[in-house]
Image (cartoon, grey):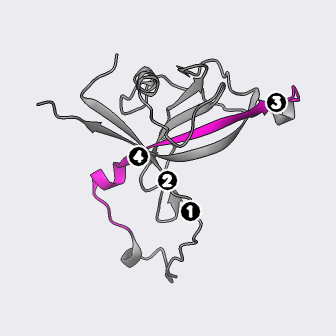
């Protein structure tokens, strides 16, 4: 059930239209330019979400079908459960910018805060949660989404805040 001590905030990420120019570093692999991180900074993760709008069903053509080799999980690596997220979404107005419609999809996954260190990409963390809107948010099981076409509505970071009870 819903824990009244926890509050979930879906932060919307602003559109990234500007190109950030990075300073040119000659001899990038030298020890002087190496990024030094503590264990906590190295292992720091973010919870990211992405809301997709249902567009249309796909044709039965095998070449047009999206294929996801991993099945959605019911629990993320940090212990956040899909049931908790679905109950929270169904009991609160979270997306004030968009009213979900039938077959819309929401994915929640964990990523490293620093996805690339010293020009080397980090490994994939693993589990992700997928929810489908069918009159209410439900856990996506058995690849219910692969026969549909989607377009991204918004994406951003998910923050969990522990409320202090008086």
Residue 30 lies in magenta, yes or no? no
- State the extent of the magenta-drawn residues as a range: 35-61
Q: SS class of the residue under badge 2?
A: loop
3 vs 4, front mark: 3
Q: Quadrant of residue 102?
A: top right
Q: Nearer the viewer, residue 114 or 30?
A: 114
Callout 4: helix, strand or loop? Answer: strand
Q: Nearer the viewer, mark 2 or mark 4?
A: 2
Q: Mark number for residue 13?
A: 2
Disc 3/disc 4 C-alpha distance (Å)? 32 Å
Marks 1 and 2 close (CB-CB < 8 Å): yes
Structural crowding at the residue carrying mark 1, measured as other residues with C-alpha within 10 Å and reported as few (<14), some (14–19) or many (≥20): few
Label 1 to label 4, Cα distance in Å? 18 Å
Looking at the image, tell me whether mark 2 or mark 3 is earlier in sequence order.
2
Compare marks 2 and 4 and give the one earlier in the sequence: 2
Seen at 49% across and 38% down, the residue is 95
Counting residues from the start of the chain, the first of labels 1 and 4 encountered is 1
**Label 4 crowd bin: few (<14), some (14–19), many (20+), radius 10 Å:** some
Residue at horizontal 49 percent and vertical 81 percent from the top: 25
Return the residue nearer the eye: 77 or 122.
77
* Residue 41 drawn in magenta: yes
Q: Pointer 1: what residue?
A: 16
Question: Which of disc 3 and disc 1 is earlier in sequence?
Answer: 1
Disc 3 is placed on an element classified as loop
Which residue is identified by label 4? 46
Tags 1 and 4 in contact by the CB under 8 Å rule?
Answer: no
Whether 99 is drawn above or below 132: the answer is: below
How far is the residue under mark 1 from the one under mark 2? 8 Å
| Residue 58: image tag | 3
Q: Nearer the viewer, mark 1 or mark 4?
A: 1
């Amino acid at each position: 059930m819903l824990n009244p001590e926890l509050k979930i905030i879906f932060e919307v990420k602003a559109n990234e239209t500007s190109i950030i120019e990075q300073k040119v570093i000659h001899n990038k692999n030298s020890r002087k330019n190496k990024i030094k991180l503590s264990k906590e900074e190295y292992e720091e993760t973010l919870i990211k979400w992405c809301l997709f709008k249902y567009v249309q069903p796909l044709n039965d053509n095998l070449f047009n079908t999206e294929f996801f080799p991993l099945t959605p999980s019911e629990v993320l690596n940090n212990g956040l459960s899909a049931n908790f997220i679905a109950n929270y979404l169904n009991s609160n107005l979270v997306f004030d910018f968009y009213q979900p419609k039938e077959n819309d999809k929401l994915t929640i996954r964990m990523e490293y805060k620093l996805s690339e260190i010293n020009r080397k990409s980090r490994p994939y963390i693993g589990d992700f949660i997928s929810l489908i809107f069918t009159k209410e948010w439900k856990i996506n099981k058995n690849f219910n989404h692969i026969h549909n076409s989607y377009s991204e509505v918004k994406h951003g970071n998910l923050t969990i805040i522990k409320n202090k009870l008086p």
